[in-house]
Image: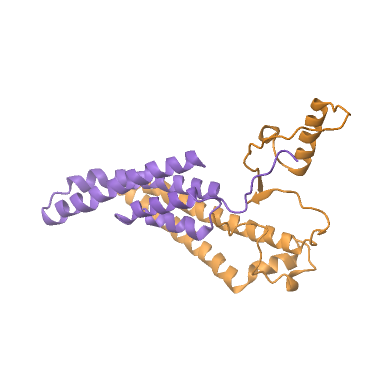
Chain colours: A purple, B orange
Amino acid sequence: MGAALTRYRVIAWIVGVVLILLVVIGMPLKYAFDNPVVVETIGPAHGFLYMIYLVAAFDLSRRADWPLKRMLLVMLAGTVPFVSFYAERRVSAWVAAPQEARTPEPVAH
Amino acid sequence: MVTPNHPLRHGNYDTVSETGSAPGTLDAMKRLWTPAWIARHVAMVVLVVSFLGLGWWQISRATAGNSLSWGYAVEWPIFAGFVVYVWWREVKLARRREAEADAPPADPAVEPAPTVTTGSRPAVRRPVRVSRVPASTGDVVEDTDLAAYNHYLSWLNANPGARPGDYPG
């Protein structure tokens, strides 16, 4: 679970940063200054990084036994600029939360 | 952690009207034909058809000269496959939940095996360090190796599905 969470957090951070670059730098350059070079280079890269994000989110959701709704929400959160960072924090909190109904089994009688 | 997929949790399940049929029968199938489930089936079909259509559209764009579209043409069928997989998994989970709801309630006199199942796998509890009391104070000196082995066997018995490496003792 820890490794899956780390994988998810790393790719979530990368996707979040690339998405912000795309929205904050690429889009104004393309639509205000008619210079689409940033969008054309970062855009497809972000697309494929997002695919990796989806895979990592799916992997984590299976390991953590999330309900389907939460998995889909986390996947969608990666598409919204800035929200992806919030989602990553929420996910980390969910996974780090103490597991319910798992009391330790005493060894000695 | 909240685990609504927990197969043992069917608190809001109408178990009374759902008894009396074995899983795998037509009756069991009927429960996947409620309005909520029909909506899910329809959503699955709509998503798959539209994703495959989008894939086909990307193929036509790719053949028209947009080389990046080859990548998207591969991605859309994968998405369609993912939708089918998630749908199949939800169906499987629902049917398993039903089967457990239908199963006769466990004898309360018998202590249930102390395993926490998450999904289909038995989760093994975290090993805990406990200070051991001396095994016996009587004059019979117990074979400690044998006692340890017996404890190990009883632990294995109490935790079906656990691997030997998970033994906390």
Q: Residue at the location (55% across, 57% down)?
A: B2
Q: Does the image show residue A48?
A: no
Q: Residue at x 31, y 48 (%)?
A: A16
- Look at the image and tell me in which quarter the C terminus of chain A lies: top right
Q: A98 and A78: which one is in front? A: A98
Taking B117 as reference, is B25 left or right? right
Of A37 and A15, nearer the camera is: A15
Above or below A22: residue A10? above
Residue B57 occupies which quadrant of the picture? bottom left
Judging depth in this view, the residue of A108 and B127 nearest the camera is A108
Q: As displayed, is residue B140 above or below residue A97?
A: above
Residue sitting at the far left: A33
Q: Horizontal and vertical percent for residue B53?
A: 43, 58
Q: Which of B158 and B133 is in front in this view?
A: B133
Image position, residue B144 (x, y; %): 80, 27
* Residue found at the far right of this picture: B140
Q: Give the side of residue B39 with respect to residue A11, left or right.
A: right
Residue B41, x across and y down, in percent: 56, 65
Q: Is residue A66 visible to the viewer in this orientation of the structure? A: yes
**Number of numbered tags placed on the structure image:** 0
Give the image quarter of residue A9.
top left
Q: Position of residue A19 (x, y in %)?
A: 28, 50
